[in-house]
Image (spheres, rainbow, N blue to C red):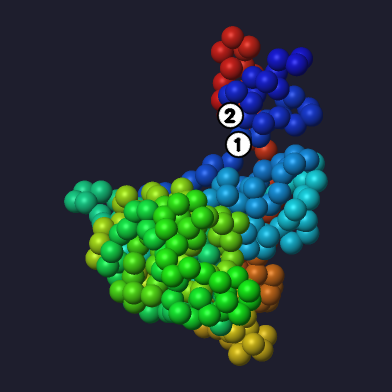
Amino acid sequence: MLLLPALLLLSGCASFPEFGLLMQEPERTDRFVLPDENTDVIGKVQYVVAHDEDTLPDFARRYGLGYEEIVAANPDVDPWLPGAGTRVVLPTEFVLPDAPREGIVLNLAALRLFYYPPVEDGQRQEVITHPVGIGREGWRTPVGQMRITQKIANPAWRPPASVRAEHAKQGHPLPAVVKAGPDNPLGAYAMRLSRPSYLLHGTNKPDGVGMRVSHGCVRLYPEDIERLFGEVPVGTKVRVINQPYIAGWKDGELYLEAHQPLAEDARRWKGSLAPMEQVVQAAGGDAPGAVDWQKAQEVARDARGLPVPIAPGSPGMDKVIADAHRVPRVPPWSETEPRAD
């Protein structure tokens, strides 16, 4: 009997105490092929079972998510001590932002970047998505259209005077230049924007990815910036947007993905859901009966970052979570030919 769990792990499956019930290892998928230009929703919500030593930040990095994303999707789970056996929802399904599908689109409210590589003749469009860290309150990452002007491997960091003044005031003075290496906050790769004070870059503190932690630059996990650095050419358009509410169609139903608005916006909106209503109305168009407004308001207030169908009679958030928690059964297999689920 001890052979079975070992074979399951080697075959890429995890097991529950009842050995007939198997769970496929969640996918860390960050590249998606779009079936057609009308595709609005990519990926699927998944889950993973925690062990004693696991934390939500551990799962976030393992499956290509940011800190705030995974915490919002699991409001009743302790981020640092989920507990053995706890099912952790992985918000690995996304409504594509309302923006042209070209170059890089960075949605501040979602703390997520989408890159649409150039499409070759006869090929389908792809999208690559990664979590990001952005400027904290008072150092907000600017919204607008820019482009990549320079790519730098092993960059040195020259902190601007404002940043050096802040650190000096806190009793942690910075040198004029921080050389490349493990202590460099820019990590191993950086891409400069046409607003030259701002960069897309790696980090020596990956725990800050998926949070508002920077002085305005955009941070990515080291493995993610390395991949983008190799694929994104100089001159690529970069659109920085701020969309806490994103709506799109999937299988004939309108879906809503909601994030907590940035603190500055939340104070200005004072709890109003009018921004969400405008987004849903624009996406729904003239489709009759496309929206259950009470359900849409619940999704917006929960702000769990999970795409949820909002049509009248649609199952809502509970069904999204239940589907993620379904555990596939696999046919019997022999010990001589273990089958991966």
Task: Please state which of residues 138 and 267 is positioned toward the viewer in this rendering.
Answer: 138
Split into 4 quadrants, where in the image is the C terminus? top right
Q: Which mark is residue 211?
A: none
In contact (CB < 8 Å): disc 1 and disc 2: yes
Badge 2 crowding class, 10 Å Cα cut-off, few under 14, some 14 to 19, many 20 or more, is some
User: Residue at 44% across / 70% down in the picture?
Assistant: 176
Percent across and percent down for residue 141 are 47, 76
On screen, residue 160 versus residue 340, left or right, reads left
- Please say if 231 is above or below 48: below
- Please say if 46 is above or below 12: below
User: Residue at 78% across / 40% down in the picture?
Assistant: 52
Split into 4 quadrants, where in the image is the N terminus? top right
User: Residue at 30% across / 66% down in the picture?
Assistant: 148
Percent across and percent down for residue 232 are 31, 56
- Count of marks overlaid on the render: 2
Rounded to the nearest angstrom, the CA distance separating label 1 from label 2 is 6 Å
Element class at badge 2: loop
Element class at badge 1: loop
Task: Please state which of residues 178 and 338 is positioned toward the viewer in this rendering.
Answer: 178
Q: Which residue is under mark 1?
A: 25
Percent across and percent down for residue 168 are 57, 76
Q: Which mark is residue 12?
A: 2
Task: Please state which of residues 265 and 148 is positioned toward the viewer in this rendering.
Answer: 148
User: Residue at 75% across / 41% down in the picture?
Assistant: 53
Residue sticking out furthest to the left: 121
Amino acid on which disc 2 is placed: Gly
Badge 1 crowding class, 10 Å Cα cut-off, few under 14, some 14 to 19, many 20 or more, is some
